[in-house]
Amino acid sequence: MNFLSWGRNPWGQDILTHISWDLLWASLIAGLMFLVAHASYMVLSAHRKGKTAEVDALEATNKDLPERIPKHSFMARMFHWVMAASMFTLLFTAFLPIAGIRFAWVQWHWMAGLVLTGSIIFHIVHATFWLDFWSIWIGPRDIPEFRAEMLRELGHDVPGPKSGKYPLGNRLYHLAIVFAALAVVVTGVIMMNRIRTPLFDRNPYIMSDPSWGLTYVLHGLAGVGLVGLVIAHVYFAVRPDKWWITKGMIFGWVTKRQYLEHHDPTRWKVGGGSAGRL
Ligand code: HEM
């Protein structure tokens, strides 16, 4: 399998052009294999099922909580779905031509790229000043939760910290998507200098050939990485056991029971004040 693709400049020198598109198929197959492996494991393993009596008791001691627990504000949901639409447009416009389906993809691609860029800038400002910023990040304080999660997955009945607003898997996923999305956005905006747009004059001379090669390679690597990441995300979003999380992103709330079953009320505080921010 080739990792890089090379071309020739007008002076006959070898120049890096982009990644080898073999990597697209590798990422697609890795994503699909993960999906099959996880689905098989969930069917065959002894992973922990919800404990009805435990949640009943929690509900009895938390009678004052509302039936619907607000989770995602309207603006947070708008960002998520605008970002998802632009991400799918980018993936299809980039990779369908590589898979042999030819159409004028570049204009749709850069326009969707600017929508993604704008939505990410909005999200950074919104999450920094209006949301509970630290609730999505991971750190050493999450090691006990990670250990407990692993043991539960292996069928052990361990007490242990439940997650705050976001489960550990979601926080790890967010970290991966931050790196991949920032890489495609920064390189994509630079690459707009190589194409014709009504926004500004094309100028392919802002960088040397090797720098352009590296920019295209980074854009391609992050792009094929996003193929695998998006497959995994969609798979978890449609799994019946995770459907309650997806519904939360559509309607903005989870039920009191779901909140008590899956979250630690001391780590995700419901109500007013900065601790209860959406
Ligand atoms: C999900 C995110 C994205 C994916 C999967 C993706 C993928 C790709 C791929 C595979 C190419 C072809 C590169 C090559 O020939 O080596 C490309 C080109 C390009 N992308 Fe993206 N991209 C994404 C996001 C963006 C963003 C956010 C922007 C702009 C803000 C952007 C702007 C461009 C431009 C201008 C080109 C160059 C077209 C050319 O030189 O003909 N992309 N992208």
Image (tube, rainbow, N blue to C red):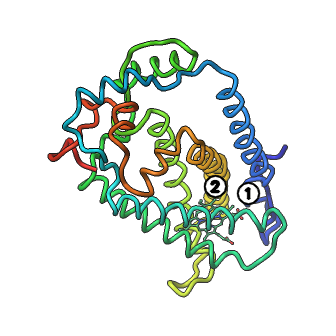
Looking at the picture, tell me which residue is in the foreground, 135 or 188. 135
SS of the residue at dot 2? helix
**Circle 2: is it few (<14), some (14-19), or many (20+) Cα within 10 Å?**
many
Q: Position of residue 50 (x, y in %)?
A: 48, 26
* Left or right of 9 on screen, residue 150: left
Please give the label number shown on residue 164: none
Q: State the residue position of label 2.
A: 223
**Circle 1: is it few (<14), some (14-19), or many (20+) Cα within 10 Å?**
many
Looking at the picture, tell me which residue is in the foreground, 274 or 155. 155
Q: Position of residue 270 (x, y in %)?
A: 23, 41
* Left or right of 142 on screen, residue 180: right
Counting labels gives 2
Residue at 58%, 83% in the rendered image: 197
Q: State the residue position of label 1.
A: 16
Residue at 37%, 55% in the rendered image: 252
With respect to residue 212, does 56 lie above or below?
above
Residue at 34%, 62% in the rendered image: 74
